[in-house]
C-alpha cells in the first residue's frame, strides 16, 4: 500500500476465516486432547475417545487397534506421527501403526533435537533415545507432573511441570536444575508450554503469563514487556517467521510483528478454554478447545473480492420481501440457512435499506455491474413502497409486514396500522416515522439519482422526493402521523430547534439534515423554491451557524446522530457550490471528525477525507476493512479479561456500563452499524464468564463483564458496514485496487 495525495493502493491480503468442527463433523468427542498437522499438511485431532483425520471437510476415524483410545499426545515423526495413547507410544506412518512402546505413566510430549536425539516425556519420567539407538540410554524422573518439553542440540533440555516450575537438565551426571518462582523470575510454578528460540532463549508459558528466560539469569515478563501476555497460557506453537500462537483459558493470542491479536469466544473459538494449537501450511492453524476445534485458514483476496462476496451473501440471506436489506434472525446458534430463520422488520427498515442502496450505488458506479444495478433498483422500489402504503402523501412508513410473515400482528398496535395495497392484499405498516427514515430515504434517492438512474427512474425519484418534501414543508418542518400529531423525532422546525433547549442535542444535527434535504431536492427536481428556502434557513434562521458546531460531545455514548451526520454532510458538501458556506460546513465536520477519530470508523474517516480533501487516516481505514470479519453472525463475545484494555468509567456516572477508551480491533468487537457503540467490550457473556473465570484467588472477584448486549449467535447482519465505506472510498478515489 503506497500513500499518495491521500490515496492508498491496496494489494491482496490474507483474509482469515475459521471453521468449527465437532462431533457433528465426525470427531469422536468434542474434548480435543491433542492435535497435529503431519508433514503433508493433514490435520489430526486426538480426543478422549479416539483419533481422527480431516478428509474432504469431515473428520474420519483413524484405526489404532484400540477401542476408543484416549489420545494424550500427538507429534510429527520422520515417518509420520508419534501418538500417545495414555501410557503407550505409537508410531504411525499415515496408514498403520508401525511400532509400540509402553511406559509407566501417561505420554506428554516427544521432541527431536538438533543432534537427532529423540526425547520422550511422560508425566513422571524423561527418556532419551540417541540417533540410531534401539533403546533409551537415559531415564530420569521429572519434578512434579510433567506438562511440556523443549530441547536443543548438545542435550539442552527443559521440562515444565504442573507444580515444580521449570527444570533444566544439567551436569555430567545428569540431574535437574530446578527453577521455581520462589528463586527465579518465573511468574508461576505451573509451566504449561515451552520453546527454545534460535539464540537459546527459553519462552515459558505459565498459568500467570508468558516469560522469556535467557538460559542464565535474565527473566522478562509482562511486568517488563507489555507485549508478553499475562494470560493463563495452555499451549504454544511457533511459526517459521517467528510468529507465536498462544492458547489460553480465554482464547487464542497471536504474537506478530511486536503486536498481540486476540481470537476468542465465540466468533473464533467454540469454547473460551483453548487447550492447544498446531500450525499447518499456508498460514493455516488449528486450535483445540474444551468443546471442539477451530480450523483457521487464510484466503488471498482483494478488498473488492471481499466486498463482492459479502454483498452476495447479504443478497442470499438478508433481503426481505420487496427488497429491504435487514438483519436475519437465526433459529439456531450460528446456523445461517434459507431452510430456517427469518428476516424480521425493524423500526428503521427504510434507513438501513437506504444505506444498503447507497452502497450498491457506489459499487455500480465503480463496476457497472448489471447484477448490482438490479439489486439497487429492487431495493430502491422497496423504499418507495414505504412512502406509498401509508395513505398519507409524502409520509413514509417505518416498515411493512405481510400476513405470511412470522411477526405479523404483533408489536405495539397503536403504531401498527392494517391496510390493503392497490391489489387488495392485506398488510400492516408501522408509523411514528422518525428523522432516521428520511435520512435513509433521501440518501438512497440522491445517490441512485446521481449514479444509477435512467431518465424514467429519475422522474420517479423527482416525484417521491417532491411528495416527501411537500409533506414536511406543509407541516412546518414536521412529519404528521395518522393521528394528526407530529412524530417524536422528525422535527426540523427552526423555531423549536433554535429556541427550545430540550432539543439542544438535535439542534445542529437536524439543521444539517434539513439543509441537506433541501439541497438534494433542489438538485433532483430543479425546483428553485428549495434553494431559496435553503438560503433562508442558512441565513435568517442561522442553520449555517448551527453547523459550525453541530456535534455536541457526549462521551461516545450515543451514536445514532453520528451516523445521520456523516450520511448528510457528505451529500451537503457534494451539492453546495458556495465556497464560503462550504468552509463553514467544513468547520463543523472537522470538529465532529476530531471527536469521532478515536473510533477508527472507516466510513466516517472517508467522508471527512472526501468532503474536505484533508488526510483522513486512510491507513486506519484500510486496516479496518482488511481486519473486518467475513462471518456476519452476531456471536457472543468475551474480551474484558484482556490486560491491554483501557477503561472509561465515566458512563457509570449516568447509570450506564463501563466502556473502553478505544474500540477493539474489528475482528474482536461486535459487528456494528454506524449508529452503534464501538466502545462496548463484551456481549451476551453475562452468566457464562462468571461460571468460568475470576481475576483473583477470591472466588467472588469476577471480571468486570461490562457487556450488556444479548448476542448469542442468533442474528446474521448485512454487509453494509463493510461494503458502504469500501465502495464509497473506491468511487471517490481514496483507495485504489493494485
Image (tube, rainbow, N blue to C red):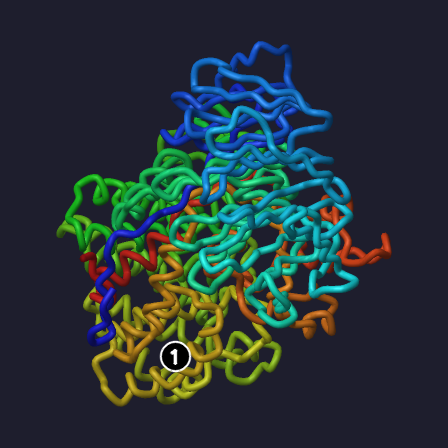
Q: Give the residue at mark 1.
A: 589
Q: 306 or 446, which lies in front?
A: 306
Count residues near mark 1 (Cα–Cα under 10 Å), then give few for <14, some for 14-19, many for 20+: many
Whether residue 407 can be seen here: no
- Give the percent coordinates (x, y) of residue 507: 50, 78
- Give the percent coordinates (x, y) of residue 45: 53, 27
* Quadrant of the drawing holding the N terminus: bottom left
Query: 187 above or below 38?
Result: below
Q: 59 or 432, which lies in front?
A: 59
Q: Residue at x 66, y 37 (%)?
A: 126
Q: Residue at x 39, y 31 (%)?
A: 39
- Give the percent coordinates (x, y) of residue 481: 52, 56
Please indicate whether residue 653 sits to the left or right of residue 149 in the image: right
Whether residue 254 can be seen here: yes
Query: 721 above or below 420?
Result: below
Query: 520 above or below 537?
Result: above
Q: 641 or 260, which lies in front?
A: 260
Identify the secondary structure beneath mark 1.
helix
Image quadrant assignment for residue 443: bottom left
Please indicate whether residue 52 sits to the left or right of residue 451 in the image: right
Count of labels in the image: 1
Q: Residue furthest front?
A: 172
Q: 259 or 357, which lies in front?
A: 259
* Quadrant of the drawing holding the C terminus: bottom left
Please indicate whether residue 15 sits to the left or right of residue 342 in the image: left
- Give the percent coordinates (x, y) of residue 112: 50, 38
Q: Residue at x 26, y 46 (%)?
A: 305
Amino acid at each position: 500500500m503506497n500513500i499518495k495525495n491521500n490515496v492508498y493502493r491496496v494489494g491482496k491480503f490474507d483474509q482469515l476465516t475459521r471453521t468449527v468442527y465437532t462431533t457433528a463433523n465426525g470427531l469422536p468427542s468434542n474434548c480435543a486432547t491433542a492435535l497435529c498437522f503431519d508433514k503433508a499438511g493433514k490435520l489430526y485431532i486426538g480426543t478422549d475417545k479416539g483419533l481422527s483425520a480431516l478428509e474432504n471437510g469431515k473428520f474420519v476415524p483413524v484405526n489404532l487397534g484400540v477401542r476408543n483410545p484416549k489420545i494424550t499426545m500427538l507429534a510429527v515423526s520422520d515417518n509420520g506421527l508419534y501418538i500417545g495413547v495414555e501410557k503407550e507410544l505409537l508410531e504411525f506412518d499415515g496408514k498403520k501403526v508401525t511400532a509400540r512402546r509402553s511406559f509407566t505413566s501417561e505420554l506428554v510430549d516427544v521432541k527431536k533435537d538438533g543432534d537427532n536425539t529423540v526425547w520422550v516425556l511422560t508425566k513422571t519420567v524423561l527418556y532419551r533415545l540417541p540417533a540410531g539407538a534401539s533403546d533409551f540410554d537415559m531415564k530420569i524422573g521429572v519434578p512434579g507432573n510433567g506438562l511440556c518439553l523443549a530441547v536443543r542440540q548438545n542435550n539442552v533440555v527443559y521440562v515444565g511441570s504442573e507444580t515444580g516450575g521449570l527444570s533444566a537438565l544439567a551436569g555430567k551426571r545428569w540431574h535437574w536444575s530446578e527453577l521455581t518462582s520462589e528463586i527465579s523470575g518465573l511468574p508461576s510454578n505451573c509451566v504449561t508450554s515451552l520453546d527454545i528460540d534460535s539464540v537459546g532463549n527459553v519462552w515459558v508459558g505459565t498459568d500467570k503469563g508468558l516469560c522469556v528466560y535467557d538460559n542464565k539469569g535474565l527473566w522478562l515478563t509482562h511486568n517488563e514487556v507489555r507485549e508478553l501476555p499475562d494470560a493463563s497460557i495452555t499451549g504454544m506453537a511457533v511459526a517459521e517467521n517467528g510468529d507465536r500462537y498462544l492458547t489460553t483459558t480465554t482464547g487464542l493470542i497471536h504474537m506478530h510483528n511486536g503486536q498481540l491479536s486476540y481470537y476468542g469466544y465465540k466468533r473464533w473459538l467454540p469454547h473460551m478454554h483453548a487447550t492447544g494449537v498446531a500450525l499447518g501450511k499456508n498460514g493455516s492453524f488449528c486450535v483445540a478447545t474444551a468443546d471442539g476445534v477451530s480450523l483457521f485458514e487464510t484466503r488471498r483476496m482483494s478488498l473488492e473480492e471481499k466486498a463482492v462476496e459479502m454483498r452476495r451473501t447479504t443478497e442470499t440471506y438478508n433481503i426481505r420481501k420487496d427488497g429491504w436489506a435487514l438483519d436475519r434472525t437465526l433459529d439456531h446458534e450460528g446456523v445461517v440457512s434459507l431452510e430456517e430463520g427469518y428476516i424480521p422488520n425493524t423500526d428503521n427498515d427504510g434507513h438501513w435499506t437506504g444505506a444498503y442502496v447507497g452502497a450498491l450505488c457506489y459499487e455500480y458506479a465503480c463496476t457497472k455491474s448489471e447484477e448490482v444495478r438490479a439489486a439497487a433498483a429492487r431495493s430502491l422500489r422497496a423504499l418507495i413502497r414505504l412512502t406509498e402504503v401509508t395513505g398519507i402523501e409524502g409520509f413514509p412508513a417505518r416498515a411493512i409486514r405481510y400476513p405470511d410473515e412470522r411477526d405479523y400482528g404483533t408489536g405495539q398496535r397503536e403504531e401498527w396500522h392494517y391496510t390493503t395495497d392497490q391489489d387488495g392484499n392485506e398488510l400492516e405498516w408501522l408509523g411514528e416515522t422518525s428523522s432516521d427514515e428520511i435520512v435513509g430515504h433521501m440518501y438512497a434517492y440522491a445517490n441512485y439519482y446521481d449514479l444509477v438512474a435512467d431518465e424514467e427512474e429519475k422522474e420517479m425519484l423527482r416525484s417521491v422526493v417532491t411528495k416527501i418534501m411537500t409533506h414536511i414543508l406543509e407541516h412546518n418542518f414536521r412529519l404528521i402521523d395518522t393521528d394528526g400529531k407530529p412524530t417524536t423525532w422528525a422535527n426540523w422546525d427552526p423555531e423549536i430547534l433554535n429556541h427550545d433547549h430540550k432539543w439542544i442535542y438535535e439542534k445542529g444535527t437536524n439543521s444539517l439534515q434539513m439543509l441537506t434535504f433541501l439541497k438534494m431536492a433542489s438538485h433532483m427536481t430543479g425546483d428553485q423554491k428549495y434553494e431559496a428556502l435553503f438560503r433562508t434557513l442558512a441565513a435568517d434562521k442561522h442553520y449555517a451557524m448551527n453547523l459550525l458546531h453541530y456535534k455536541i460531545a457526549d462521551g461516545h455514548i450515543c451514536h445514532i446522530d453520528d451516523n445521520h451526520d456523516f450520511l448528510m454532510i457528505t451529500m451537503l458538501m457534494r451539492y453546495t457550490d458556495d465556497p464560503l458556506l462550504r468552509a463553514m460546513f467544513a468547520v463543523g465536520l472537522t470538529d465532529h471528525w476530531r471527536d469521532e477519530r478515536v473510533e477508527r470508523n472507516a466510513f466516517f474517516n472517508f467522508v471527512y477525507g472526501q468532503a474536505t480533501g484533508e488526510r483522513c487516516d486512510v491507513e486506519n481505514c484500510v486496516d479496518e476493512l482488511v481486519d473486518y470479519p467475513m462471518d456476519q453472525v452476531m456471536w457472543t463475545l468475551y474480551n474484558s479479561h484482556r490486560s491491554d484494555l483501557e477503561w472509561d468509567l465515566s458512563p457509570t456516572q449516568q447509570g450506564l456500563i463501563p466502556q473502553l477508551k478505544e474500540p477493539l480491533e474489528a475482528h474482536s468487537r461486535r459487528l456494528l452499524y454506524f449508529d452503534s457503540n464501538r466502545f462496548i467490550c463484551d456481549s451476551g457473556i453475562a452468566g457464562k464468564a462468571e461460571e468460568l473465570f475470576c481475576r483473583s484467588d477470591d472466588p467472588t472477584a469476577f471480571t468486570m463483564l461490562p457487556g450488556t448486549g444479548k448476542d448469542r449467535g442468533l442474528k446474521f447482519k448485512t454487509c453494509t458496514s463493510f461494503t458502504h465505506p469500501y465502495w464509497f472510498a473506491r468511487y471517490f478515489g481514496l483507495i485504489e485496487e493494485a
